[in-house]
Amino acid sequence: MSKTRVSIVMGSDSDLEIMREAGKALDEFGIAYEIDVTSAHRSPDRTADFARKAAGRGIQVIIAGAGGAAHLAGVIAAHTTLPVIGVPIPSTSLQGMDSLLATVQMPAGIPVATVAIGKPGATNAGILAAQMIALGDASMGKKLEAHKEKLARGVEEKSKKLREK
């Protein structure tokens, strides 16, 4: 397997079903990743240590999913210069709106790229990580172009089926 380039972390193992979608997207592009649990609140020292050491381990992008207060992506971003993508998890009665706002409302100087709530967001986080990697990897750019073409063909096929009915 190729060198791990992306780290997917989540605040709880209950987030795994959603965060697996990021892994599926990365698999589509042949990007090696690791997946783990760390918490901004329950294991703050572990989280800070993870963030500080990620670049030294060859990680290029971090995808962090969290629900509720959803501070994981921001805490990680505070301890690294790597790009961090936050995935809001719908884990409370607020259906992820609390997570979305907590993830996206970062102070100036600590950016977190924030995607949609839940599985669509996790999928987009994987694709966005591939786009970030493609900035320095032309072969990844070609894979992304093929992905866009596949999406366009899917729309054409659905349109054709609809017109035939």
Image (cartoon, grey):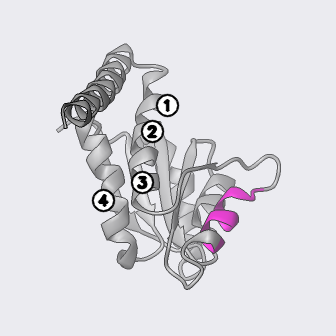
Are discs 4 and 3 less than 8 Å apart at CB? no
Label 3 sits on residue: 120
Q: Earlier in the sequence, mark 1 or mark 4?
A: 4
Give the Cα distance between marks 1 and 4: 19 Å
Determine the secondary structure under disc 3: helix
- Residue span colored magenta: 98-106
Determine the secondary structure under disc 2: helix
Is 138 colored magenta in this rendering?
A: no
Which dot marks residue 129?
2
Q: Residues within 10 Å of mark 2 (few under 14, many from 20)?
A: many
Q: Earlier in the sequence, mark 1 or mark 3?
A: 3
Are discs 2 and 1 less than 8 Å apart at CB? yes
Is 103 colored magenta in this rendering?
A: yes
128 relative position to 22: left or right: right
Residue 28, image x, y percentages: 24, 37
| Vertical order, 95 against 63 (above or below) | below
Which marked residue is nearer to the observer: mark 4 or mark 3? 3
Q: Earlier in the sequence, mark 2 or mark 4?
A: 4
Quarter residue 100 falls in: bottom right
Q: Residues within 10 Å of mark 1 (few under 14, many from 20)?
A: some
Which marked residue is nearer to the observer: mark 1 or mark 3? 3
Residue drawn at 50 percent across, 42 percent down: 55
Q: Amino acid at mark 4?
A: Arg
Residue 21, image x, y percentages: 32, 55
Which dot marks residue 132?
1
| Vertical order, 94 against 33 (above or below) | below
Residue 30, image x, y percentages: 24, 34
Q: Amino acid at mark 2?
A: Ala
- Magenta stretch secondary structure, dominant: helix
Residue 139, image x, y percentages: 31, 16
| Vertical order, 123 against 146 (above or below) | below
